[in-house]
Structure formats: structure tokens, C-alpha cells
Amino acid sequence: EQAGDPSRARPYYLAAARTARERANLAEAERLYRAYLQLTERPTVESLEASIELTGEVLHIRGRLHEAEQVGRKALADARNLGAGTAETRALIGVAHIVRDSGRRDEAQHLFEEALAAAKTQGDGNTEGTMVRALAGIFQERGQPVEARRLYEKALRIHRRLGNRREEGILLDRMGGFDRLVGRVRKAQSRYEEAIAIHRETGAREEEARTMGHLAGLVLDQGRYEEARTLFEQSLGLRRNLGNRMLEAHALRNLGVTFHGLSRFDEAGTHYE
């Protein structure tokens, strides 16, 4: 870049951004992705992939939903203009997850269904299973447990058939939440523990932090405060490493509740602040 041809630095920025992301250094990954995209004169399949990664694996994880949606929608429009079907589906999925986490459930369902149809057309079984799982979550949030359970089980069958361990771990976490909701506490704990083991095996650190928080909440509900404290602290450590301030704040609040249950009121107050 200093030699007068900034475009020659583009591939190095992208490679460095991906390395930083894999190491969970999301602030640095964001800086490098943006530097790469600023040097991109017109959209290409490569730049679309970079935008999609920035959307879902950096900005969304960091809780920057508005910015993530802006980048994701631009990537979606560019993919459609280029006729890049696979990139379009990936961008669509990224936007759908952001919309869901922004509380716009009906819009998210429409986007997930659109992505599911595209995955079936493309013969992409992994994405098909992931979209079935996403729709199951929508129905669970709406209080429609029968349809949610049917879809979770369908998604789990798809991913086990394909050998997709990462998605299997995510599904076990979601099904654990379902079991917890209907009072099957032992089954929920078993699913959470199996999911955590799979997350560690696959290196899915955000999902490990999420599931550990879910398990801690289950343990807390049973009054097992010391065990819950350990789990919440482990989850908090993972979330801090990921740079997700929104999930970090949630973990801190739960730690405050746990310390209150342990009658350690000064520490509880510190975590509530």
C-alpha cells in the first residue's frame, strides 16, 4: 500500500481479517475487513463473502445489529445484481438472523422460508437443515411447541445424516431449551452438556458460551448457586474474549442474581451495576 498501489494490499487485508476472526479478535477483524472492502472498487464473489463474514461473524456477534443489517442488506443486493446464487442465500440468512434478533419475528420467518426454498433448489442439505432449525426457533418463540419440536427433530435428522457436528451441537442446545421450557430438567441438562462437548470439539466458541449460559440458568433455577456461579463465570470469560458486549452484559446480570442467591450481596451489587 505504501508503494503506491493500495489494491495490492487487498488480499493481505482479507487473509489477516479471517485470521483475526478465527482467533476471536473481532475488533481487529472488523478493522481489517473494512480496510479490505474500502479497497474494493466493485462487488465480486470474493468481496461478497467478505461482507457476509463481516455481517454474521463479526458485527452480529459483537451485538452491532443495526450496522450488521446495513452491511448484510448491501451484500444481499450486490449478490442479486451479480447473479451469485450461493452468496445471495448466505447473505439472506445473515440478514434473517439479524432481523430475528432485532425482534421482527414475522419478517425473519419470511426470510428464513425464502432461504430454505433456495437451499432446496441448490441441493444444499446443510443450509436446508439450518433453516429448518431457524424456523423451529421462531415457532418456539411464538409458543407453538408441537410444530417447534417437529422441526427441531427434522433438522437434527438432516444434520446427523450429513455428519454436521457443529449444527448438531447447536440443535442440542435449542432442544435443551425446549425441554427446559416444558419441565424436562434432566433431559435439558443432558442435551446442554452434550452440546457443550460438541462446541468444544468443533471450536464454536460463541455457541459454547451461549450453551454454558443456558446450562447455568437451568442449574440456577434449581438453587444450585455455587455450580451456577462457576458456569456463569466460564460463560462470561468466553463472551469477553469474543467481544460481545450484549451477551457479556447478560452474563454479568445473571452472575449478580447468583451472588445474591449465595448471600454475597456486595458482589451481587457489583455485577448489577
Image (cartoon, rainbow, N blue to C red):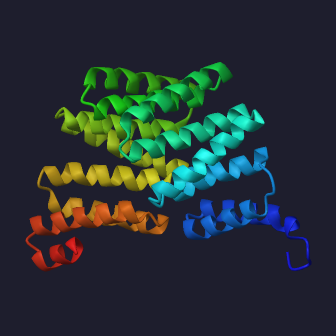
In front of the other: 75 or 60 = 75
Q: Is residue 205 visible?
A: no
Q: Quadrant of residue 89?
A: top right
Number of callouts in the render? 0
Horizontal and vertical percent position of residue 71: 60, 52
Q: Residue 91, position in %: x, y?
A: 61, 41
**Residue at left offset 67%, top offset 62%:** 33
Quadrant placement of the C terminus: bottom left
- 203 lies above or below 8: above
> Which quarter of the image is occupied by the N terminus?
bottom right
The quarter of the displayed image where residue 148 is located: top left
Residue at image coords 55%, 64%: 24
Q: Is residue 261 left or right of residue 244?
A: left
Residue 31: give x, y in percent of width and height: 64, 69
Tell me the residue at 31%/54% (across/down): 213
Q: Quadrant of residue 186?
A: top left
State the residue lying farthest toward the left: 263
Residue 193, above or below 271: above
Q: Would you say 63 lies left or right of 57 here? A: left
Residue at figure coordinates x 38%, y 40% from the top left: 104
Q: Is residue 2 above or below residue 104?
A: below
Is residue 211 shown left or right of residue 169? left
Left or right placement of residue 197 versus residue 158 in this view: left
Q: Is residue 188 visible?
A: yes
Q: Could you tell me residue 136's position as x and y percent?
A: 38, 29
